[in-house]
Image: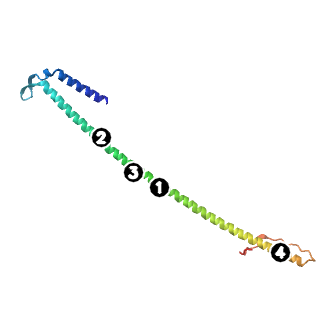
Amino acid sequence: MNIRTIILLLISIAIAALAVLNWNTLITPTTVSLGVTDIEAPLGAIMLGLTILLSVFFLAYVLTLHGSVLLETRRHVKDMNAQRDLADKAEMSRFTELRQFLETQQRQSQDLFNARMDAMEARVTARTAESENVTAAFMGQLEDQLRGRASSASGVQRVADVDVGAFKPSGERF
């Protein structure tokens, strides 16, 4: 309980105690002026009744106000939950877009890497074939020179300088 409720409860108890202790005085008839006429009635009972009526209206007002605050709070909580759900969906959408972007980037990087590897493999294969052809041509020239030397056994021939870059690969494999 908060302090306001305790104070209101204490005031209500004090009014009720005064009414019970002074009941005979409250119900004593006196002349009461209503503005246009005068009547004989118990003024204390009238004032007590008006105080009770005022308290009932005050309680009705407080309960109505409290109910409207509760309904407003409930509506506000619903709106906040809806906004949170929208924010969660937007965040999930951003995560999905980010995942798709990263997958696309990874796929492009993988494709680029595969293309580079294929090109490098093709260059290595071509280079290997060229090297094999150059080596075979060089070996063939050396064999020809050795045969030429063997046929001219009487004279000493000098082996010609061979320029390896002068040979063009034929594309045949030996």
Query: What whole-number distance in Å separates the C-alpha atoms at marks 1 and 4?
Result: 69 Å
Q: Which residue is mark 2?
A: 70
Type of amino acid under label 1: Thr
* N-term-proximal mark, 2 vs 1: 2
Is 83 situated left or right of 170 in this image? left
Quarter where residue 163 is shown: bottom right
Residue 155: image location, x then y, percent: 92, 76
Q: CA distance from mark 1 to mark 3?
A: 15 Å
| SS for callout 2 | helix
List the single residue furthest toward the front.
20
> Which three-letter amino acid code belongs to the residue tagged 2?
Leu
Q: Which kind of residue does numbered mark 3 sit on?
A: Leu
Looking at the image, tell me whether mark 4 or mark 2 is earlier in sequence order. 2
Q: Secondary structure at mark 4?
A: helix
CA gap, disc 2 to disc 1? 38 Å
Residue pointed to by mark 3: 86
Which residue ends up furthest to the bottom in the rendered image?
A: 151
How many tags in the picture? Answer: 4
The earlier-in-sequence mark between 1 and 3 is 3
The residue pinned by badge 1 equals 96
